[in-house]
Image (cartoon, helix red, strand yellow):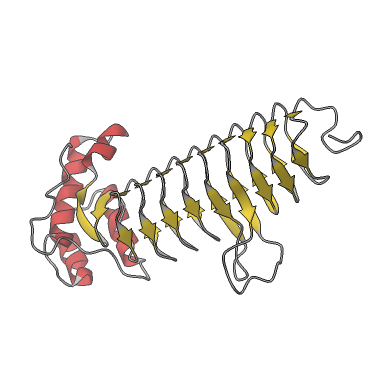
Amino acid sequence: MPPGSANAGNEARVHPSAVVGPQVVLGEGVEVGAFCLLDGRIKIGARTRLIGHVTILGDTELGEDNVLHPNVVIGDEPQDLAYTGGVRLVRIGSRNVFREGTTIHRASEHGKVTIVGDGNFFMQNSHAAHDCRIGNQAIIAGGALLAGWVEVGDRALVSGNCVVHQFTRIGRLAMLRGLSRTSRDVPPFCIMDLTHTLRGINVVGLRRVGFKSEQIRALRDAFTALFGQRQNLKLAVERLLSERPATPEVLEMVEFIRSSKRGVAFGPRNRGADEDSAEE
């Protein structure tokens, strides 16, 4: 670290082989490991660890207690042919883990900021493209790819090697099974596999975070009413709300469906609804 830099005198530890630009601000207890490159208007919160071979570029801010494993790249230019090099942002919260080879890109020419919340776990070689919005405590598993403008709700699970089309939304506590793909919105609390095919309610995930049996039962009943057969989803929503009182969780699912712009994933075509949502 050059004498007199913005970081001089704090408790950050920087390996001699690391390259840290003059606009970088390191919080107390930050560790920058061997062969890291930090270049741009970068702010890194207290106790965040860059284990080694980490690259952070652009106008990027990370909160406290993050861990970045080797070959992570944060804040590089978007993979957008229209991008002309303007200032675009990455804002990352606290207590996130980025495993080997994860990439998080800055916003695009037509965007402003890529956002990652708190407590998320990005497994090896996962990717969040420009302008993504990742909530809190989500898991993006190995090889999963989120295209531009994707939104991922709190505690959602995007399993290994899934692909999510641009502008698609993944609801809170939803689960995408491995190797699945979607270009349609996945409602909260649901399990999806294959090509945007909903299989049932994420019972295991809901129980793990403390949902009660009656809450889960209401969601399973709503799922059957909405996705038990291929039908006009708008009419199915109206019928569901007219036939029974809706719990807050069911209302959350309904509002997500109503606000969809890309359309919502389908229920199973030939087999019964909710077939796979029991304990596995």
In percent of the image, x 8 and y 58: which residue is there?
A: 271
In percent of the image, x 31 and y 69: which residue is there?
A: 263
Specify the quadrant of the image occupied by residue 84.
bottom right
Q: In which quarter of the image is the N terminus?
A: top right
In percent of the image, x 29 and y 65: which residue is there?
A: 264
In percent of the image, x 46 and y 42: which residue is there?
A: 124
In the image, residue 100 lies at what x, y percent?
Answer: 52, 40
Q: Quadrant of the C terminus?
A: top left
| One can see residue 186 in this view | no
Specify the quadrant of the image occupied by residue 48.
top right
In this rendering, the answer to whether 246 lies above or below 5 is below
- Position of 70 with respect to 44 (left or right) is left
Q: Which residue lies furthest to the right in this view?
A: 4
In this rendering, the answer to whether 27 lies above or below 168 is above
Between 44 and 122, the one lying in front of the other is: 122
In the image, residue 272 lies at what x, y percent?
Answer: 8, 56
In the image, residue 13 lies at what x, y percent?
Answer: 74, 27
| One can see residue 197 in this view | yes
Specify the quadrant of the image occupied by residue 76.
bottom right
- Position of 62 with respect to 181 (left or right) is right
- Position of 48 with respect to 210 (left or right) is right
- Position of 276 with respect to 128 (left or right) is left
